[in-house]
Image (cartoon, grey):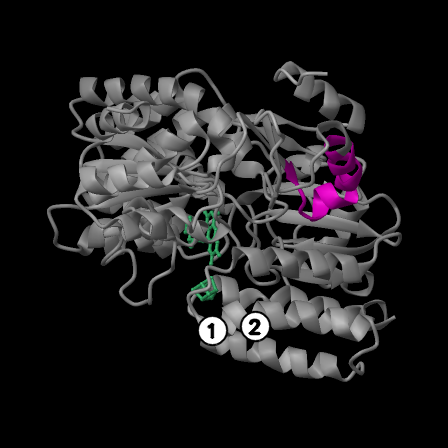
Amino acid sequence: METKKLKKVDIIFENEQGLSMAVLEKTLKRNPDDIILDLIDSGLKGRGGAGFPTGLKWKFTKNEENPVKYVICNADEGEPGTFKDREIIERVPEKIFTGIAICGYVIGAKEGYIYIRGEYNFLLKNLNVKLQEFNEKLKKLHFDFKIYLRSGSGAYVCGEESALFESMEGFRGEPRNKPPYPTVAGYNSKPTAINNVETLVYTTMICHMGPEKFKALGTTDSRGSKVFSVSGDTPIPGIYELELGMPLHDFVEDFGDGDTKAVQIGGASGFCVTRKKFNDTIIGFEGIPTGGSMMIFNSSRSMYNVLHDYLEFFCEESCGQCTPCRIGCQQLLKGIEAVKRGERPPSYLEDLKKLTATMKIAAKCGLGQSVGNPFNSIVDNFREEIIY
Amino acid sequence: MSTTEVLISELVELHGRTRNSLMPILQGVVQQEKYLSEDAMITVARELNISAADVFGTASFYTFLDTIPRGKNVVRVCKTISCHMKNKEAIIRALEDTLKIKVGETTHDKQFTLLTANCLGWCHKGPVMLVNDEVYPEVTPETAVEILNKYGRSK
Ligand SMILES: Cc1cc2nc3c(=O)[nH]c(=O)nc-3n(C[C@H](O)[C@H](O)[C@H](O)COP(=O)(O)O)c2cc1C
Ligand code: SF4
């Protein structure tokens, strides 16, 4: 398998004076189809978790015939262990705005929105000032496009794109059935290109430096770099932009505290990888894709407590709309508690695993579908800790 | 007109009289009044020409759109795994002891409500808490109590 050495890069936070405006002016003169070709060529995939190719998403939205379309920047960042979007918003907001404007130009939209979680309300004042300045600059460029801010109100599931649209339309944040996909019917049922904060900054930077430099980084399946949020048992928690495709082993060497027993990749809805698999786990779309959350646990931690925490999180954040997820999350939590107390035999864990398989098929959205990721990877690897 | 009605008509003026404005309007009311009273929800419904049940339905979905009275200052301590590992329990205990309330309750003088929250996005700088919209990373039981004093805790 193709792997890369751990390498720090500096693309997202590069903040040369005037960079955003120069990119914007240059790009607004290009043919939208060429911009799409560049993005497809760069191999950029969405950085919000699901990893859909960004160039294709823009192409599908562009191809829809509709006078009204929208661009939305997903800044709901609710996945436990993720805090990179907040840092990007604080440090390089113009690069986000530029990505949104370029997307608007490419797909033919007149309005862009940033949906930012209520937990980040303290960012709004500054962000609003910067945004007004940016909107003014768009006017001066005679580009008919405006960006607006919208806030969330404390609901993890609103990061799911269709729940986010519901929320913006004034409804409960309950995910919709798919299809139709957002590129066909998103916000206000109009064609919508929705991208993560980090994805939009990479689009700005690909327009700046060209696809070649971007795709020189990473592997065939995982082009480029990615911002990681590192937390847990590490001497150096924080935000790091790293080339994709590194083995987890390298990551743990650099970031662990010397006693790492497991890493949870991708937040509560991601996967737990244990020490013996560090060598053959690749961080990237071919291995374990991630929205960037890396939580490190050392041998003093009880993985029962970790799983218990995650399940409590899902019980509270499930929107409750569909039965497999609403009831499933509760049963998984009660189930491991019962096994721990000895009220259920260890074999009950197998029944619970079957329940996660049902949830994966029958739950309506990614939240319920992915509860099995942490559940199975922790139960399989740390069975003793769950039982005793 | 009551102060709530005045506030809502200003918010409607600002954000527009459509369903798409419902969230910003409700958020604006909570910003000022800390929660959505029955009166507030009925007024919003009338202004937007939707049913009050619809307004309540939306509001009750969101953790930050409280429909029961809250104190002047709402304290939210992150309880998710990274902050858990950094001993959020000690922070919560210190706040409970100081305010003489449990999580979920409001002080008698209506100055403080103490709540927990899911991941606040500061996992590298836990434990963390929000007071209203302000964020306080890397708090200790001592600094957490000092922060309350800043918000006018009567000793
Ligand atoms: C429960 C759930 C929560 C999500 N939360 C977020 C989020 O906070 N931020 C985000 O960018 N994407 C989130 N997503 C993914 C979005 O639905 C969507 O795929 C993403 O915004 C697309 O952008 P991208 O292609 O740039 O990654 C979430 C998905 C699910 C199922
Ligand atoms: S899977 Fe869970 S969060 Fe998603 S729609 Fe169903 S109940 Fe809601």
Q: Is mark 1 within 8 Å of ligand 2?
A: yes
Residue that mark 1 sits on:
A323
The answer to whether residue A31 is seen in the rendering is no
Which chain does the numbered disc 1 sit on?
A: A
Residue A208, quarter of the rendered image: top left
Residue B150, quarter of the rendered image: top right
Q: CA distance from mark 2 to mark 1?
A: 7 Å
Query: SS class of the residue under badge 1?
Result: helix
Tell me which residue sits at (52%, 27%) in the image: B133
List x then y, in percent, for residue A203: 39, 39
Which chain does the numbered disc 2 sit on?
A: A
What is the number of the mark on residue A328? 2
Q: Which residues are magenta?
A: B77-96
Q: Amino acid at mark 2?
A: Gly
> Dot 2: within a 10 Å radius of its alpha carbon, few (fewer than 14), some, or many (20 or more) residues?
many
Q: Earlier in the sequence, mark 2 or mark 1?
A: 1
Secondary structure mostly seen in the magenta stretch = helix
Front residue of this view, candidates A45 and A270 = A270
The answer to whether residue B57 is seen in the rendering is yes
